[in-house]
Amino acid sequence: MTPAETPLIRTAMPARPGAPSADADNAPEPAAHLAARGFGLRYGTHAALTDISFEIPEHRVTAIIGPSGCGKSTLLRAFNRMNDLIPNVATSGELRVGSLDVNTPSTDVVSLRRRVGMVFQRPNPFPQSVFDNVAFGLRLLGLRQRAALAERVEASLRRAALWEEVKDRLDRSALQLSGGQQQRLCIARCLAVDPEVLLMDEPASALDPTSTARVEELVLELKGRYTIVVVTHNMQQAARISDRTAFLMQGRLVEVGDTRRMFTNPKEKLTEDYITGRFG
Amino acid sequence: MSRGRPDVVLPAGVHWRRRVANRVAIGGCVLATALVVLPLGLLVLRLLESGLHGLSLGFFLHMPKPVGEPGGGMANAIVGTLIVVGIGAAIAVPVGVAAGVYLAEYGREWLSGVVRYTADVLAGAPSIVVGVAVFGLLVMPMGHFSALAGGVALAVIMLPTVVRATEEVVRLVPASYRQAALALGAPGWVATLRVVLPAARAGVTTAALLAVARASGETAPLLFTALGNRFWSVHLDQPIATLPVMIYDYARAPYSDWNSQAWTGALTLLVLVTVLSALMRLATRNIR
Amino acid sequence: MTAGAPTRDATMVTVRERTPDTRRRWSADDAFALALRLASLAVLAAVLLLIWQTWLGSRPAIQAYGLRFLTGTAWDPVAEKFGALPYVVGTLVTSGIALLLAVPFGIGAAVFLSEIAPPRTGAVIAFLIELLASIPSIVYGLWGVFVLAPFLRTLVEPWLIKHLGFLPLFQGFPFGLGILPAGLVLAIMVVPTVTSVTREILRALPDSLRGAALALGATRAEAIGVTLDAARPGILGAVILALGRALGETMAVTMLIGNTNHLSWSLLGPGATMASVIANEFTEAVGKLHLAALFEVALVLFLVTLVVNAAARLIVLAATGGRRDVAGAA
């Protein structure tokens, strides 16, 4: 199938600020920030991920796509050890954040999770005020003075493009915000503790189209400072916002590469079938 | 390191105080749980230690004997408990099941809201207040204590439990059962009586048995209704001995022989009440 | 007076039918519904009975003493002076001690069961705690008198007097029986309530709450702190519910509290509660006024528990989002 025969994908590639440009292929490859080497994960006897090997470059957006149940969320959650919450989980192989192997017994999960932030599919602000939500991580780290907290809270809310909307209601409950606002609040909450990586598990799937667009804009703005990994079932979204894409199926990595290239000229037939909507 | 922010530098790593606090908090919860469960073990062990040796056929068949005479039992109290609890159940179970069915089937009327709230109020009433009220209602006009009054007091105590549990269980019966019966031409009351209620039978029976078990252990409401009786009596209009009250009397007595019998009685009561409740709960867990 | 039957022609098959009347006829369904409603009214009747009988019985005392009944401290059946303050205070103090002990331990156990323990272990321990709730009060009383009281008298109370005796709370002699033992056994009896309701409330919280806290780099204890904070209104309800239970508890308290109407600061000394004075004196009441005074004590006790339980149920219902099955665990 030639690129001309894939109208679906063409229309999903409008020019947006920060979007990968035509010479993305010629720019120098940024250093790998996250990496998987032969990584596997089992729930009891069921193998959720098998032999995953790829790299996630720094300060770029990498999308993980694939049909339901292919393990994309599991892979994402492996990077900050959130799969530990599920009983009977066993991992094999290597998974790295920077130079740290995430799965060794000596890994400090608590500080890992601060370096690697996570945004969930459904916005999950705490039933506390907006201020307290963003300040939560800061207070854990020992920051107590109101002035310093307020400064960082404002900076995080600004960076999450939410400040203007909540600056007059910082002490009101976060649950009163709309879905899209709550999700941006969760992003601000993550940003407050200065992570290096942002893991986003279908961050806009529970939101309306307008909020989705805002979140996508936000991702593009943030990528200059953070390494972002987005799991999405929406291929157009992956095409819009990501620089690299990894395609998973049934726990295995089928293909990974530059987003533009993958969507216009996929190497694997399976990838092509998925992208053109033949299944999944 | 702070990604372009020139202000406060956040500490890297996890402060040791947080780790210590984490360990202490989790350890504290484990300790708390152990301390909460500990009395159960202590109690059961002491009951077995002090009460088991007195447990003989004679205990169940013999009448209480005067102090110093060996071989006394609590036969009258055990029978008395069965009678008084029986009266209570005979009143509370039919009425309670009927009320529970009403709440489940007609749950949207204003009356049902009132009844539900009242059942909750009744559930929270201290059992001694129930005893006082039934004293005023029955004992004073009759002029004497009676097994009947004791039964009525226990019925009042059992009622809210039966009502609530029946409502819950009947609600769980799928609406399709009732609709199928109605579609076959059965009138509403037949559908309820012949289809819905039998479907809920297991749950209702369990609930009734739980209420009965709990009522068997009650002492306070019997103190001024059934009172107690050192002699054999199965007359409903006479005071009657019951196990909890006899345990109470024997426990306070200055005779070690009687104290020992109190332990045996308490062991019997524990088996009757707690073991029965435990079995009922286990049974419902499997059903759910 | 029947409505006119619809006209038929010969082609219509006559089937025995229920004619739709303009006036409702009494059917078996209606009779059945009536029977059910009457049964429900029995529940109302029971509560009305409680209120009416206790009020009726206390009228002589209410007329004689008015509000002084609640403020007076003299309780002399022979001289016919009745002041119930010592009993009200005793009830509040023993319940207070019970809550002070039961709430932290109960919440700690609930946290363990819902956040820390592996599921099967948690279920077993939760079951054991439910068993504690079903042990009859008289059994607790017996154990309290013969096991707990001597233990307190020989080991705990001397220690308290020695180390904390500068406080008026812990002055006096180690009796073994008294306010402290009564409060202690009450705590043991009331802990299962706190634990089971708190556990249900914690379980009702969404997992995403814990997930969000942990993903931000919180330790397990810090994440538990977030869930407890979110569960606060419901836990308050659980505590008030436990208070309601403690207030009405009779047998174990009566056997352990020492039974005197003398008010003192010391927790080691004897006291009495509203329930215990009724249990002790009712059958031996000296004269009509004495009996009426005891009736009045019962009335006061009933009203207090009524208010407390109503408040508790409202709070628990609101906190569990109106799910009665959870609230019913209380």
Image: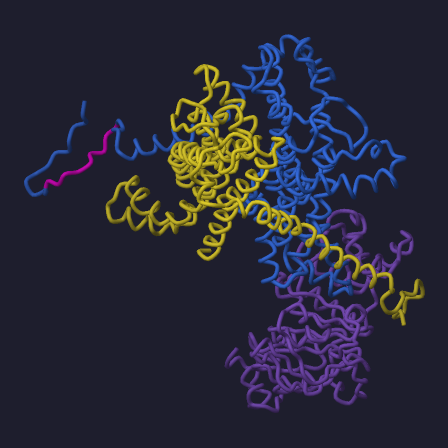
Chain colours: A purple, B yellow, C blue
Q: Is residue A176 visible?
A: no
In this view of the protein, which residue sits in the foreground, B2 or C314?
C314
Where is residue A114? Give x, y as percent.
80, 68
Residue at 89 percent across and 51 percent down: it is A146
Q: Looking at the image, which residue sits at the far front? A: B69
- Magenta stretch bounds: C14-22
C304 up-or-down from C135: above or below = above
Residue B246 colored in magenta in the image = no
Classify residue C13 as left or right of residue A229: left
Residue at 73 percent across and 68 percent down: it is A118
C315 up-or-down from A65: above or below = above
In this view of the protein, which residue sits in the foreground, C218 or B128?
B128
* Number of numbered discs: 0
Classify residue A123 as left or right of residue B208: right
Where is residue A212? Give x, y as percent.
66, 64
Classify residue A222 as left or right of residue A152: left
A4 up-or-down from B253: above or below = below
Where is residue B138? Give x, y as percent.
45, 19
In this view of the protein, which residue sits in the foreground, C191 or A137?
C191
Residue C16 colored in magenta in the image = yes
